[in-house]
Amino acid sequence: MSDTLQLLQARRSVPPIALGEPGPSPAEIETLLRIGARAPDHGKLAPWRFLLFEGDARLRAGDIIASIYAADHPEATADQLDFERKRLAQAPLVVAVISRAAPHVKIPLWEQELSAGAVCMNLLVAAQAMGYAASWLTQWHAYDRRVLDAIGLKPHEKVAGFIHIGTARALIEDRSRPDMNEIVTRFDA
């Protein structure tokens, strides 16, 4: 079996809480983003972009998330607000893949959105191939327009995923996978 197939068969998500230093170097980040951008892209529209959260910027973004959470949950405890503040600070690097899909005369919106999802998957596989662990998440803050506006998204942009990348601090057991007999059918005309 090829190294690529072994990599794909072993791919699994590692939760951000289990990620730590070291994270990718600047050169490795550049490589990750170039690989991410090689996703299928009908029409060569690049209907996505990257927003990086590194260093102290992770906590500054977390302050935005925590303040919006606090506004919606005045009963929130200090621990809950601290959790919200650290949402993007557990892994050394978080890459937000921003879908900027827009109506197009030839390329359906759905295909553009799928392309952003393919970018997320490319980043996960590339991170693992480089020896890192990663997780693709959205969670409530990815859908809250106040958060999106505050972190610099344009009104038509959405978060396809926050890709948390770092070094696994513990061995994470693989989850059960779908039974192929339950998810595979063959068309028979």
Image: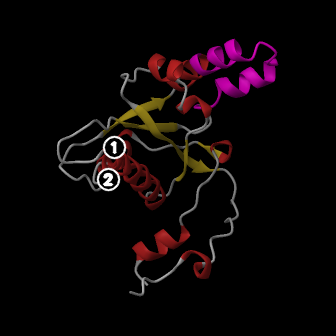
Q: Is mark 1 on a helix, strand or loop?
A: helix
The residue carrying pointer 1 sits among few (fewer than 14), some (14 to 19) or many (20 or more) residues within 10 Å by Cα, namely few
Q: Does the segment drawn in magenta span residue 83?
A: yes
Q: Is residue 165 above or below residue 8?
A: above
Q: Name the residue located 57 percent from the left edge and 17 percent from the top edge.
A: 64
The residue range painted magenta reads 64-88
The image quarter in which residue 22 lies:
top right
Of the numbered discs 1 and 2, the one sitting upstream in the chain is 1
**Can you give x and y, in whole percent of width and height, for residue 82 in the image?**
72, 23
The count of marks equals 2
Q: Name the residue located 47 percent from the left edge and 23 percent from the top edge.
A: 148
The answer for how far apart the CA atoms under marks 1 and 2 are is 12 Å
Q: Name the residue located 38 percent from the left edge and 22 percent from the top edge.
A: 155
Q: Which amino acid does label 1 sit on?
A: Ala
- Position of 2 compared to 15: left or right? left
Per the image, the residue denoted by label 2 is 35
Q: In this view, does 93 lie above or below 112?
A: above
- Position of 114 compared to 150: left or right? left
Q: Quadrant of the N terminus?
A: bottom left
**Can you give x and y, in whole percent of width and height, for residue 119 in the image?**
37, 50
Q: What residue type is labelled 2?
A: Ile
Per the image, the residue denoted by label 1 is 27
**Can you give x and y, in whole percent of width and height, for residue 97 in the image?**
41, 39
- Position of 69 compared to 120: left or right? right
In depth, the one of 21 and 11 nearer the eye is 11
